Image: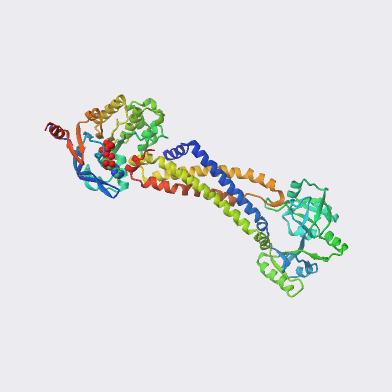
Amino acid sequence: MNETAAPPTLIDIRNLAKSYRRGGQIVPVLTDITLEVRKGDFLGLMGPSGSGKSTLLNLIAGIDKPDAGEILFDGVDITRLSETALADWRAGTVGFIFQFYNLIPVLTAFENVELPLTLTRLTRRERREHVETALELVGLSDRLSHYPSELSGGQQQRVAIARAIIADPRLIVADEPTGDLDRHSAEEVLTLMDRLNTDLGKTIVMVTHDRRAADQAHAIMYLDKGELSTSADVHERSLR
Amino acid sequence: MQFLKLVLRNALRHRLRTALTLLGLVVAILSFGLLQTVVDAWYAGAAGAAPTRLVTRNAVSLVFHLPLSYRDQIRAVDGVRAVSHATWFAGIYQDPKNFFPQFAIEPRTYFAMYPEYLVAQPEFTAFLRDRKGAVIGRKIADTYHLTVGDPLPLRGTIYPGTWEFTVSAIYDGIDTKTDTSQMFFHWEYLNETIKKRAGRQVDQVGVYLVDVTDMDRVAEVSRAIDALFKNSLAETLTETERAFQIGFVKQTEALVIAIRIVSYVVIVIILAVMANTMAMTARERLSEYATLKALGFSPGYVASLIVGESVAIAVIGAVIGIVATFPVANWFAAKVGTIFPVFEISGETVVLQIACALGVGVVSAVAPGRRAATIKIVEGLRAIG
Ligand SMILES: Nc1ncnc2c1ncn2[C@@H]1O[C@H](COP(=O)(O)OP(=O)(O)OP(=O)(O)O)[C@@H](O)[C@H]1O
Ligand SMILES: [Mg+2]
């Protein structure tokens, strides 16, 4: 075993560009983004508001399409997949954690977590076992039949995390997962995300404004004016 | 399972909104059913007509009668099984609003030709014996609380004066579609009275009723009868009982068409209400639908959640509305008494009610369903419910 060998690349982003049209004017958001995410990485994306962090994350997660460039996920360019193929790819590959949790209000914690599994061939019993395990992992075994409105923000986000990992995805994307939480709940969520990364080996890309949250990540990229830079670059720039 | 759960729980999410929409649906489906039943009641006479029965009337107008002598001539036409006659009396019972038709008839031949009017044999015998006797339908008896033996005075309009009748018999219909709002009495009594008063319409009858041996000869026989009296003083027009009845309804057809249009207008109104509700509902949930799509659910799944919810509400409304139609129709029928001889909700009306409700459910969901299915996920996620 070669100890210096880096883990294989999971996501290979090349010359990615995305712009929006606003009132006849074209506003470039991302220009020529090139980025590599390795298997098992925990990448933090930071940058000022409006810099395009969410846009980049959405492209990586396959819920938006770029104007140019490619996103190779395990060698497959997901920007070329059809809508249907992309939906299947997301269902099997990506776990989502949103700032506002995005749980379905009419479903209980259990049912919310079960939702992605209804797209699989698992039996009812297998689903039940999986869901119980996932909710146990996030420490909500005693809240199975609670509706989102009966849970605190932190608890809702933990349910969302359970939902994000239930189908055993290889990638987890999180857009400001602690943005709506108090410090204590935010810490719980970040600890959980760290466990997903270290214990379960999930690759995570997380957008955040929160310095504390970013500390959890192994690597941080800064996005500004459509361009990416590493923390080292930023450090260097500030020294100059 | 998950699908149905989502559909039903979504439907119950805004209790008040759903309840109000349901109330609207129930009222619409109920009104639609009642209006359709009114239209049916209008055509009930034609619907109850037997295919082998013909009506021969004066070719000029119903106002003019036909000589009694025609009876034997018609009976001699090949293909005729039996002949009877009936004369419109137009008497008033107590008050002009107490309307029911009265006919002067030839008892034996008439009731032989109309097996759908059921009269108990002893009562019928009593009727034959009493020249001032009358047979009334069950609906008249119920509406005006008349029983056998009661006097039944009518104020004549075509034939002036007060006419004293006695209820000898009450007939029932062979089924609920039979008209039991008619009164029959002896034509002999009418004719003798006119004779005594030296009236002009002696030995005349309103229309002849002709029973044809078999259905295929109906056209041929009616032509033969009319040919018989061609160029006579009273030329005839013979048509099927059904055509004859429809001729009556035709006079009021504009009203019937108006009622029919109103019944569909009611459905269009509830469609607009329902479509608005579904649009509002779906708009509020755009971010949820986007979340589902992000998780890998197809646009079709999301659209069918909306269609399912809309149809579920519509079907519940339809069921309550249809169930409510029956007691309301009964109450209405009792209120209007003998104006509508037959007032019955047909199977066709119920099917139309279901079809309208399903139509409302599906059409209301088309626009919001399409929007939820086609909106880009990132845009849907930005829409905060
Ligand atoms: N659908 C859209 N139409 C037009 N402009 C858009 C759209 N989505 C995003 N933008 C613009 O693209 C830019 C980047 O948006 P994005 O949401 O990626 O920023 P962000 O870095 O996530 O910001 P924040 O930290 O506030 O969440 C912004 O200027 C935004 O106004
Ligand atoms: Mg953002």
Residue B176: image location, x then y, percent: 68, 50
The residue at the point 52 percent across, 38 percent down is B19
Q: Examine the rendering and report whether any part of residue A63 can be seen.
A: no
For this rendering, which residue is in front, B167 or A221?
A221
Q: Is residue B311 above or below residue A132?
A: below
Quadrant of the image occupied by residue A12: top left
For this rendering, which residue is in front, B226 or A219?
A219
Instruction: Give the quadrant of the C terminus of chain A.
Output: top left
Q: Is residue B204 above or below residue B142?
A: below
Residue B238: image location, x then y, percent: 70, 67
Q: Examine the rendering and report whether any part of residue B152 can be seen.
A: yes
The residue at the point 29 percent across, 25 percent down is A183
Horizontally, is B257 left or right of B185 in the view? left
Horizontally, is B197 left or right of B172 in the view? right
Q: Residue furthest left?
A: A240
Horizontally, is B385 left or right of B251 in the view? left
Horizontally, is B310 left or right of A155 in the view? right
Which quarter holds ligand 1? top left
Residue A100: image location, x then y, percent: 34, 34
